[in-house]
Image (cartoon, rainbow, N blue to C red):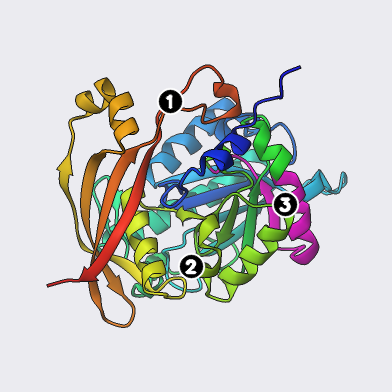
Amino acid sequence: MADTFRCSDAARERMDPMLGTAPPQRRLLLVEQDSGWGSDALASLDVPDDLREEIRASTAGSGTRVMLIRRPGRQRSSVCLMRAWCVVDPFAPAGHRITWGTWSYPTELLAGVERAEELASWARAAGHAAPGQEHDTGPQARALPADTRQPRTGTPPGDDELLLLVCTNGRKDVCCAVRGRPVALSLAQRFPEETWECTHTGGDRFAANVVVLPDGAIYGGLDTDSALETVAAHRQGRPGEVRQHLRGLIGYPRPVQAALLGTQLELGLPWGQTRLGPLVEATARLPESQVEEQGEQLAAAGAEVARWRIDVDVADGRQMVADVTEHLRPAAALTCKAVGRPAHSRVPLFKGVALRA
């Protein structure tokens, strides 16, 4: 009998690069729901269809990713009907990056949706967003405007406490459950209040995936031991010690993630010491039609399909420019369900950093 294919095993054998593979949405709306998880979090949300579509439209407009969460082991009181929601924005000013609320009735989730909209409006008003793509100055940004400084009435104030998410979404990919659940239980023993299981984080083949909030860091390829080591290193500001597990920073396109985190690692900086500068420029890019037609040849040759010049500002005042290239990886089954349907993945590679002229 042939061995069962597991995409995470195959990715580890191929040594698939991880850096720059975090999801691009800047904010997260986390909704506690301990059962009924399908492959799509919003489609699985246990609310009326019209409310689901309202949430879908609003979160798409505010750059927010909806994820379902539950406590590891699915242990939950059958008496209490109160469930949690949480909005996370790693780029909001200190003290506002995490906002918790509760819901018993579906419409009460709109408080979380509105909080995400408030934060998006602040980012635009503060000049931290460009049409179609938000480029923030990060936690060092100036204070919130008065009208968004506090959540709506009835919503608890924000905080910056540690929050850990572990993808265990087996309906999306079996690797997420097989590798994720032991990691969630391991982290919950050390961080019982901070740890939640969650739906899809992207990158099934990098399971087990852990999201460290409010920083917006995602780490992959973890097991029960390396997850504890990685969270400890991150909290101590030493991500370079676990760089082999670092996937990226949510809220940015992949080349920008590679530039920010590549610079951080290259210079030996603690987490959060780099931010996006004024210029993101594609200095070379192959036409998409050529990439599609010549994908096999480009992947086999390791050829660049794009090159980026990305300005990176360091907290100590240095102004840097990072060189990032994009490449196609050889076609492979990127999820457990994709056996027989190989596809190319496009990965950014950090090439180096220098002082800006």
Position of residue 304 relative to residue 100, above or below, is above
Mark 1 or mark 2: name the one nearer the start of the chain.
2
Q: Secondary structure at mark 3?
A: helix
Disc 2 target residue:
150
Report the mark closest to the observer, 1 or 2: 1
Q: Amino acid at mark 3?
A: Val
Q: Amino acid at mark 2?
A: Gln
Q: Are marks 1 and 3 in contact (CB under 8 Å)?
A: no
Image coordinates for residue 152, horizontal then vertical, percent: 51, 60
Dot 1 surroundings within 10 Å: few (below 14), some, or many (20 or more)? some
Q: Is residue 184 visible?
A: yes
Residue at image location 46% in from the left, 75% down from the top: 270
Dot 3 surroundings within 10 Å: few (below 14), some, or many (20 or more)? many
Image quadrant assignment for residue 227: bottom right
Q: Secondary structure at mark 2?
A: loop
In the image, the segment drawn in magenta is 180-201
Front position in the image: 126 or 200: 200
Disc 1 target residue:
343
